[in-house]
């Protein structure tokens, strides 16, 4: 059975530390060989709200892409996300599949996720965690993409985050 490398964006701006820890614990129950970037604090993008904690998780799975996406949405619901809220709003836990191997597709989910290229809170953790991996469409490494990132309005602050309970 082939294992697929997946990259997942994790974010929270409601009880951030609790939900970030719980989200990672749930990911460890569903996927294997979990590794994480540093945790970064970032301002809310697209709406006025509390700052987010963000990180990127690398994991491996034998599940097909649709089932991975369904699993992520299920984990979000288990941690208080209702999916009835509007696109840009506060949330307990936000899990987005960024990549699934080098797959490029538009269904059942858009891959690679478009926000990789325009949100610092996704690209910087990617550049840290998998700097030499290549973006499936842009054809450049995440480190190269981060070095060329020019949106001066997006600010990130590293968070001293210890995963002691996970």
Image (tube, rainbow, N blue to C red):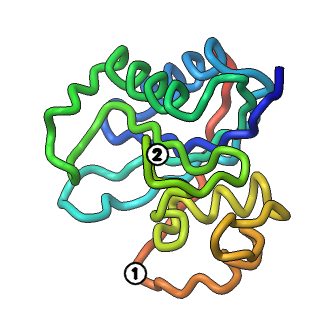
Q: Give the side of residue 49 with respect to residue 132, left or right.
A: left
Residue sitting at 36 percent across and 14 percent down? 78
Where is residue 146 drawn, in percent x and y? 66, 75
Residue sitting at 77 percent across and 65 percent down? 134
Task: Report helix, strand or loop for mark 1.
Answer: loop
Name the quadrant of the N terminus. top right
* Sequence-first tag of 2 and 1: 2
Q: Which residue is mark 1?
A: 153
Query: Is the residue 38 above or below the residue 12 in the image?
Result: below
Q: Which residue is mark 2?
A: 53
Name the quadrant of the C terminus. top right
State the residue in front, 106 or 143. Answer: 106
Residue sitting at 69 percent across and 47 percent down? 37
Corner quadrant of residue 11: top left
* Mark 2 vs 1: CB contact within 8 A: no
State the residue in front, 108 or 125. Answer: 108
Query: Is the residue 153 above or below the residue 17 in the image?
Result: below
User: How crowded is the residue under tag 2: few (<14 C-alpha within 10 Å), some, or many (20+)?
Assistant: many
Query: Is the residue 132 above or below the residue 118 in the image?
Result: above
User: How crowded is the residue under tag 1: few (<14 C-alpha within 10 Å), some, or many (20+)?
Assistant: few
Residue sitting at 80 percent across and 29 percent down? 3
What is the CA distance from the residue labelled 2 to the residue labelled 1?
A: 17 Å
- Count of numbered labels shown in the rendering: 2
């Amino acid at each position: 059975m082939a294992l697929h490398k997946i990259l997942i964006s994790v974010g929270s701006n409601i009880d951030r530390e609790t939900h970030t820890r719980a989200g990672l614990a749930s990911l460890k129950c569903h996927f294997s060989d979990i590794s994480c970037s540093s945790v970064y604090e970032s301002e809310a993008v697209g709406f006025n709200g509390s700052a987010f904690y963000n990180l990127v998780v690398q994991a491996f799975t034998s599940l097909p892409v649709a089932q991975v996406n369904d699993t992520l949405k299920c984990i979000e619901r288990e941690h208080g996300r209702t999916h009835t809220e509007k696109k840009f709003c506060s949330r307990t836990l936000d899990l987005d599949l960024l990549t699934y191997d080098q797959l490029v597709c538009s269904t059942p989910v858009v891959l690679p996720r478009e926000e990789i290229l325009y949100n610092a809170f996704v690209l910087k953790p990617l550049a840290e965690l998998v700097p030499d991996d290549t973006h499936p469409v842009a054809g450049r490494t995440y480190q190269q993409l981060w070095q060329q990132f020019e949106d001066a309005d997006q600010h990130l602050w590293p968070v001293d985050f210890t995963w002691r309970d996970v």
